[in-house]
Amino acid sequence: MLPWVYYEKLAKLAVRKGVNVQKDQPVVISACVRDAAFVRLLVKEAYEAGARYVEVNWSDVELTRMDYTYQSLETLQDVPQWLYDRRKTDNEAGACYLTVRSDAPGALDGLDPEKIHAVNVAVSRKMRPLRNYTMNNEGQWCIFGLPSVEWAVKIFPDLPAQEAFDKLEEAIFAVSRVTADGNPIAAWDEHDSNLMGYGKKLTDRQFTALHFTSGLGTDITVGLVKDHIWVGGGCFTPKGVYFDPNIPTEECFCMPEKTGTNGIVYASKPLSYQGRVIENFWLRFENGKVVDFGAEKEVDTLRKLVEFDEGSSYLGEVALVPYDSPVSRSGILFFNTLYDENAACHLALGACYPENLRGGTEMSEEELAAHGANNSMTHCDFMFGTADMDIDGILPDGTRVPVFRKGNYVI
Ligand code: ZN
Ligand code: ZN
């Protein structure tokens, strides 16, 4: 295990840079009981940053498994009102949200997938009115990961548990830019400004579409909404508080025009969805909608995603990630989207981010839809970037501008 000072630095990074806690702001932390020692560091750091109060929502995957095993579907689907009210109260108090992830991929394997799916739909439906708070960056939020033995042995099944943990731990701190002697906050300031630079260049061009090709067979044109904004690095709340919602982040992302995607995309990495791993899959789009798909493994799980609701068969995000990113260079498949999406260019089925449209965060759902934004109760990223990926930006007059060559920016 790495010295504790790494964990202290990570806690500081998450509180000061991740959510950027403001004086007198409530902080809500979601974490697993296995990470209790680390969560105490987070809570202390949050109070030192001026938090009014810090609330921790504990979870435990073994207890979750028992709930799914012993509770009836009706009970599980009956999302309690107090859960809704608590979140609403925190939103109204202007809270920021920190989520610590350390669960193993496939932690719900062996349970009834129909039950898990039905419960996910019920929870999404109930909490939907409250989702805009984070989806629109009304308040700060940040998701980041911590290594766990359970997770490590899934990634490195051939290694002894301790060795696997050490490898995952080293990788997580490296891609989070937390080192023994460096200053992670300064490193993130620089990283953010690089990403914002690419975001600005892309936004200034206002491409009508991007055309992606790769040796895997991907040949897809993704239309972009008019007046789009490429977002990279951190975000601002309406009050002007700067924060980094994901640690790590390597992407610049934008909003596809709902009906503007045509062609075929081949995933370049497996996708972990609802505790299952979908492998070697492809999707074919016509006028924005998935019209055909296939997978070597878990095609039924892929179907559940595509058919989750009306919007989950359309794109809500297109994101550029250089093949030379630290996550990509680590060569590790984390089986966790937070990391894996930063290893490669990705697309997301489902809801868009209104911040990717000029004035979008102030628009109603109807106005957003009129601008070509997709809406859904889900948002699921999948990776399709490769070392040989080429991307052309297409200007309104049809001119093509090279954006990526061989997996990296040339713009
Ligand atoms: Zn993304
Ligand atoms: Zn996404």
Image (cartoon, rainbow, N blue to C red):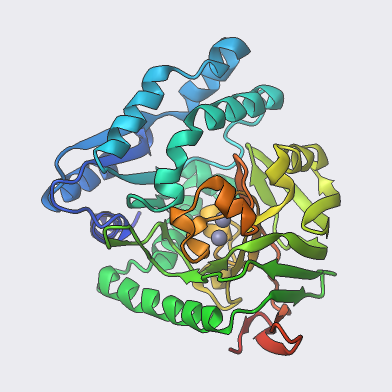
Residue 113: x %, y % from top left = 69, 27
> How far across and how far down the image is residue 132, in percent?
45, 44
* Image quadrant where one finds the C terminus: bottom right
Residue 297 in the image, given as x and y percentages of width and height: 81, 45
Identify which residue, 134 or 322, lies in the foreground: 134
The front one of 78 and 409 is 78
Q: Is residue 37 visible?
A: yes
Image quarter of residue 344? bottom right
266 to the left or right of 321 = right
| Left or right, residue 303 beside residue 101 | right
Would you place residue 223 above or below residue 311 in this image? below
- Give whichever of 35, 206 is nearer the camera: 206
Task: Identify whether 311 is placed above or below 327.
Answer: above
Is 143 in front, or is 360?
360
Point 51% across, 56% down: residue = 354
Q: Residue visible at 17% across and 38% down? A: 53
Locate ligand 2 by image quadrant: bottom right
Q: Is residue 302 left or right of residue 233?
A: right
Can you give x and y, in whole percent of width and height, for residue 356 in the image?
52, 64
Residue 177 horizontal side relative to residue 390, left or right: left
Say above or below: 380 vs 346: above
Query: Which quadrant of the view contains residue 187?
Result: bottom left
Q: Is residue 101 visible?
A: no
Q: Hey, which quadrant is residue 192 in on the image?
A: bottom left
